[in-house]
Amino acid sequence: AKAEARGSQRRFAPDMEAAAQAAAALLAELPEAIEQGAIEPYFQPLVALPARRLIGFEVLARWPHPQRGMVSPAAFIPLAEEAGLIGPLTEALLRRACLAARDWPMPLTIAVNLSALQLSDEGLTPRLEDILAETGFDPARLELELTESALIGDLDRARAALLRLKQRGMRLALDDFGTGYSSLSHLRALPFDKIKIDASFVGRMSEQPECRSIVGAVIAMAASLGMATVAEGVEREAEAALLDDLGCAIGQGWLFGRPMPAEAVTALLAGPAPR
Ligand code: C2E
Ligand code: CA
Ligand code: CA
Ligand code: CA
């Protein structure tokens, strides 16, 4: 067994080395990619249930790389955080998303992901406000998505930072709910407008009654705290039907639309009105 373990280690080591080299190469290219706008905002529909009326889009970062193809944000967001570049990257994406949204025929919402690191940056609120002012985008149309990892540590500080954003008219969503650590008393104390139920629960809902119960309980709890719920990763009709039954307000997932570039959004919104 020992020899086997050593053998498998030998087999994996080159892969890990290759992965580390790829990450190092991406990291080296990242500052220029951000500066030159090579990383683009894609837009994924958010729909009001049960009618599936389009209410906005989540902004998701994409890096179309000349050699590597489309690079996933799972690969470069952690590198941007590590390199201290997540602020500039987020700001560049927000600016481009606001500019794109200016041409839309109706005032839909955009939801932008913030890294946990950004919440402890004192300059965050004024920089976001500058971008909104510069692009003429109404803060009430901007939603900021934060994961539970942004809330660990000093709860009072996190709360103060969230309130600053709220006071400027922006809305807040708690992302990936159920995957991290957040106590119910945290939730009650923090000024979130929405809770996004993680795709891992939504995806198992049809087969696993306990997942359905969890989703139902989260929706009820959110409602009692005055928050709306968004179901992430909705891929199948059966899931949408269950979410309707459970009273989930908003859906997101491949069933309703994939992330798309700004031009595709413009075309979608210019197209014939949905039934
Ligand atoms: P997230 O914020 O939870 O975003 C939702 C992810 O689920 C996106 O992956 C989206 O493409 C994917 N998704 C949406 N619908 C479906 C579905 O029906 N089925 C499946 N299997 N997946 C679906 P993506 O775009 O690869 O982003 C991954 C993560 O990277 C995001 O997870 C977010 O944590 C992070 N991220 C993306 N863009 C940004 C950004 O601009 N800033 C920051 N800080 N993080 C970002
Ligand atoms: Ca998100
Ligand atoms: Ca999420
Ligand atoms: Ca996620």
Image: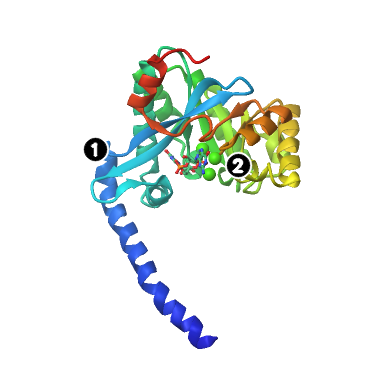
Among the 4 quarters of the image, the one containing residue 85: top left
Gap between marks 2 and 1 measured at Cα = 33 Å
Location of residue 248 with respect to 13 vertically, above or below: above
Q: Which residue is mark 1?
A: 36
- Number of other residues with Cα within 10 Å of mark 2, as a class: few under 14, some 14 to 19, many 20 or more: some
In percent of width and height, residue 266 lies at 36, 20
Q: Which x, y percent locates residue 174?
A: 59, 36
Q: Residue at x 73, y 28 (%)?
A: 245
- Residue 195, located in which quarter of the rendered image? top right
Reply above or below: 51 against 15: above
Does ligand 3 reach within 8 Å of label 2's beta carbon?
yes
Q: Specify the amino acid type for callout 2.
A: Asp
Nearer to me, 168 or 171: 171
Q: Earlier in the sequence, mark 2 or mark 1?
A: 1
Residue, x 71% and y 44% (percent of image)?
A: 211
Residue 16, quarter of the rendered image? bottom left
Q: Is residue 8 shown left or right of residue 201? A: left
Query: Which of the two discs, 2 and 1, sits closer to the camera?
Result: 2
Q: Residue at x 46, y 12 (%)?
A: 273
Residue type marked 1:
Gln
Relative placement, left or right, of 77 versus 140 is left
Circle 1 SS class: loop
Dot label at residue 198: 2
